[in-house]
Image: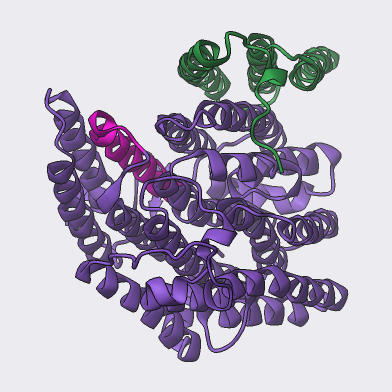
Amino acid sequence: MSSLYTYLFIAALLFSLGIFGVFQRRSLIGMLIAIELMLNAASINFMAFNKFLAPDPIVGQIYTLFIMGIAAAEAAIALSIIVALFRRLRSINIERAQELRG
Amino acid sequence: MKLWMLFIPELYCLLMGVVFFGLAMVARPNPRRDYFVALLLASIGVVVALASVKLEGSLFFEAYRVDLFSQVFKVMLAMGFFLVVCLCTELNGIEERHHPEFYLFLTTCTLAMMMLVSSVELLTIYVALELSSYSLYILVPLRRGYGIDVEAGIKYLMVGATSSAVMLFGLSFLFGVTHTTYVVDIIHVLPNVIGTPAAILGLLLTLCGFFFKLAVFPFHFWAPDVYQGAANQVTAYIASASKVAAVAIIIRMVSLVGGNSQYLVDVLVTLSIASMTLGNLVAIVQKDMKRLLAYSSISHAGYVLIGILSMSPTGYASAIFYALAYLVMNLCCFLVVVKVAQDGSDLKIAQLAGLHRRSPILAMALMLAVFGLAGIPPTIGFTGKFLVFTAAMEKGYITLVIIAMINATISLYYYIMVVKAAYLLEPDVAQPQLAVSVPTKVLTASLVAVMVVFGVFPTYLLEVARAAARMLL
């Protein structure tokens, strides 16, 4: 059982790092990487729960595959919007994008 | 009956998507053609959704359930899509060559949300939610020329991606605690273990992803920027159809605990009060009509949560009714926004001055819709609020209802300001008459009729909502 907690601990650590990164990073690419960390934390959780607890030994792995695929799609959309923003502002710093306020 | 017939509304959406994809391939842009194709297909879509209301069954290894609950929401989504397409007669906010793509992503988003309300398996829910979000992420920066669209798009995407990652982390805990990913099985296991930290944490983190969609308090800050930055029609869609789907899935997830978690209720009460209060107070100072509607949508998310956190069939039914009322009222508001700002620009509240002279019917529609949002009888908004509050009173949440009442009173202030701008203020420079076409007049009149008639005689809709809510338990 203790090894399950090791995995959960690592996942929680990755997740916290991701949350911290999203709030602390000013570069959009950095934020995107932080979000990927959070997704990977969820993947580790799924795999660990699956290995140690779940009766059906394949569900967690399928989840992880789906998460990887969807994260790739997300990165593609995010990067395309980041490129569009870069063309306009010549910067990918989120602080520069402050026209909308109120 | 063949099994695939259960899937007809979604298949039809997919077909629409293929048609728009084909139109996007054609080299020469032709906005009129695109509009009429979209209008025709969307109106058939409503008929298809209505025709499949009575279907029941399950598909895809039990991961997908078609019942009255899901079908009612599919009808609402199809109607929302149709009404948004109706607003696209002058789609000036988006470049002409992008019109087919605009319709394409609206269709995929509708498809995804139809799948979302039917899915009863965690992975299916996740995939459907992401598909609908991704379509919207692309729609927001499609706007032409104002320089704020990309910024709004990136903010939307970053908040959305973060909240969906949080949701996924929560789903992993739900999976770990219950050892299953099927909602039907979770309903049996979860109420017994909801006292454990892992279960409650999992459920709360899961709800984060849906709270983002509904713009509930800690995940609300994208709403004003996105509402302002996106093209008016896209904003109308985000504000109406996407909120309806979010309500559906939150009801589905909250009903998982079977009504015996005081802790979850406490959290939902806090979020509901925070959303209402924050939305209403910040809305008071807004100058931009779409930003005002954004903050008003945050406060309405709070009202809907009151119905949901009652965790009773009455509460769920009232939330469903409220979602429908909100769809109609909000689309009516956006109809006016789109028609008054015909060049596709942002509408300031001051620009509404003299609207009663420029176009009496639009001014009247705006007044009724805004009164509905404020909850003044005899509109459908009053009935919705009444039902939601009654459901909470049955459970004895008197303090919550009183706070909500106070909030409704605060909200009256800024709603009245809008009506005042439209009826009492005169513009500095005389504005020309607004040309309102006959179909638009018919549309406006029917929206107004729906708001008033179902406000006075809500029995039929309420019966439908109750029957739909019974499907959950």
Identify the residue at the far front of this view: B429
Q: What x and y, as percent, mark residue B173?
A: 71, 32
Q: Quick check: B154 above or below B321?
A: above
Asked if one can make out residue B351 in the rendered structure from this viewpoint, the answer is yes
Is B100 colored magenta in this rendering? yes
In this orientation, which residue lies closer to the viewer: B52 or B236? B236
Q: Residue B435 lies in magenta, yes or no?
A: no
**Image side of residue B293 versus residue B194, left or right:** left
| Chief SS of the magenta region | helix
Whether residue A1 is visible to the viewer of this picture, yes or no, is no
Q: Is residue B17 above or below residue B233?
A: above
Residue found at x 50% / y 31%: B149
Q: Is residue B106 left or right of residue B428?
A: left
| Camera-nearest residue between B166 and B273 | B273
Which quadrant of the figure contains the N terminus of chain B? bottom left
Is B290 placed left or right of B95 in the picture?
Answer: right
**Magenta-tinted stretch:** B94-119
Q: Quadrant of residue B473?
A: bottom right
Q: In the image, what residue occupies the spot 80% across and 36% down?
A: B198
Chain A rendering hue: green
**Camera-side residue of B77 and B138:** B138
Name the residue at 34% across, 43% down: B111
Residue B3 place in picture, x, y as percent? 22, 49
Q: Which chain is purple?
A: B
Total labels drawn: 0
Choose top left, top right, bottom left or bottom right for residue B66.
bottom left
Can you say whether B365 is above or below B335 in the image? below
Residue B265 x/y as whole percent: 80, 59
